[in-house]
Image (spheres, grey):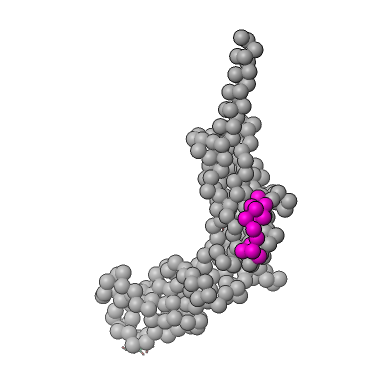
């Protein structure tokens, strides 16, 4: 009687451990990337209030470029995704309490596909790894809007556009602009404040960094917003912040 009780007790402990492992396993492990600033994000497991949970992050570059993955049979694709061989620890994200890890430096071969994975530990129990989807920076990073500066005279507005910068640096230390990686276009919109606030009129689309908008009315307030556009990927940035001016 005693014996079967302790067996049952042991079985419950094992079960409990498995349940806890599942409860703390990180969820929704995904890359977020803006101008190649690429961070791995996740959500804590379903266990609520496990305050002492800490996380461990690994990453790997895929052995096989995106084009080759298309030709792998499914079981190799599985091995490729979950293979253990080339995972590297991210030292800065080893035993952290945050739910985010900066992998910008580790994903700097922007044409290569990467994976990230996270595991959690709480009260001596370790979860399994949660793996991200494949992440290829060049294809998936979001491009930011240009920086816009505005100069105006009586009947015209002159804009200067500056492409967003990547986090990667030249030997000289300056940050490499996104124009080095993509054929970028700018889209410039004007908002005439006499009209509907939401009514943006496209006034320019192209690569110029200095743009003059003419034929405007003195005494009227105009606002400018701009976007970056990557034709090859059909990716558009968010709107830049609004720059307004009243023509003299
Ligand atoms: C990325 O690398 C640069 C230069 O090696 C270093 O200064 C920076 O701290 C690193 N950042 C991260 C988040 O690892
Ligand atoms: C703007 O108009 C004023 C008169 O309305 C004129 O004196 C001034 O020279 C004009 N400035 C420019 C830059 O055209
Ligand atoms: C990426 O962006 C975050 C948030 O803006 C910033 O703290 C971090 O330093 C950036 N990473 C790099 C490598 O520039």
The reply to whether residue 185 is visible in this rendering is yes
Give the x, y percent position of residue 225: 40, 73
Q: Nearer the viewer, residue 57 or 66?
A: 66
Residue at the top extreme of this rendering: 1
Residue 76: in magenta span: yes
User: Split into 4 quadrants, where in the image is the N terminus?
Assistant: top right
Q: Nearer the viewer, residue 9 or 41?
A: 9
The reply to whether residue 108 is visible in this rendering is no
Give the x, y percent position of residue 193: 29, 74
- Residue at the location (55% across, 53% down)? 30
- Residue at the location (47% across, 82% down)? 206
Bounds of the magenta span? 68-82
Q: Nearer the viewer, residue 149 or 132?
A: 132
Relative side of 193 to 165, left or right: left
Count the marks.
Answer: 0
Relative side of 74 to 224, left or right: right
Residue 171: in magenta span: no
Give the x, y percent position of residue 192: 30, 76
From this view, report whether residue 134 is shown above or below residue 98.
Answer: below
Chief SS of the magenta region: helix
From this view, report whether residue 127 is shown above or below residue 184.
Answer: above
User: Split into 4 quadrants, where in the image is the C terminus?
Assistant: bottom left
Give the x, y percent position of residue 169: 66, 68
From this view, report whether residue 105 is shown above or below residue 126.
Answer: below
- Residue at the location (37% across, 87% down)? 214
From this view, report whether residue 38 is shown above or below residue 12.
Answer: below
Snapshot quadrant of residue 55 = top right
């Amino acid at each position: 009687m005693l014996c079967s009780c302790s067996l049952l007790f042991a079985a419950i402990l094992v079960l409990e451990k498995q349940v806890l492992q599942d409860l703390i396993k990180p969820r929704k492990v995904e890359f977020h990337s803006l101008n190649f600033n690429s961070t791995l994000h996740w959500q804590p497991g379903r266990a609520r209030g496990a305050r002492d949970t800490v996380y461990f992050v690994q990453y790997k570059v895929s052995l096989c470029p995106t084009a080759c993955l298309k030709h792998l049979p499914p079981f190799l694709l599985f091995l490729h995704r979950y293979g253990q061989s080339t995972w590297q620890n991210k030292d800065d994200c080893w035993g952290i309490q945050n739910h985010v890890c900066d992998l910008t430096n580790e994903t700097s071969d922007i044409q290569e596909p990467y994976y990230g994975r996270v595991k959690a530990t709480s009260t001596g129990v370790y979860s399994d790894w949660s793996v991200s989807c494949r992440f290829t920076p060049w294809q998936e990073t979001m491009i930011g809007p240009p920086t816009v500066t505005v100069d105006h005279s009586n009947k015209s507005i002159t804009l200067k556009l500056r492409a967003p910068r990547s986090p990667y640096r030249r030997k000289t230390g300056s940050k490499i602009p996104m124009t080095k990686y993509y054929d970028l276009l700018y889209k410039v919109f004007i908002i005439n404040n006499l009209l509907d606030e939401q009514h943006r009129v496209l006034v320019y689309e192209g690569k110029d960094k200095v743009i003059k908008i003419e034929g405007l009315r003195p005494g009227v307030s105009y606002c400018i917003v701009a976007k970056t556009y990557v034709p090859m990927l059909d990716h558009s940035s968010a709107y830049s912040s609004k720059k307004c001016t009243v023509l003299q």
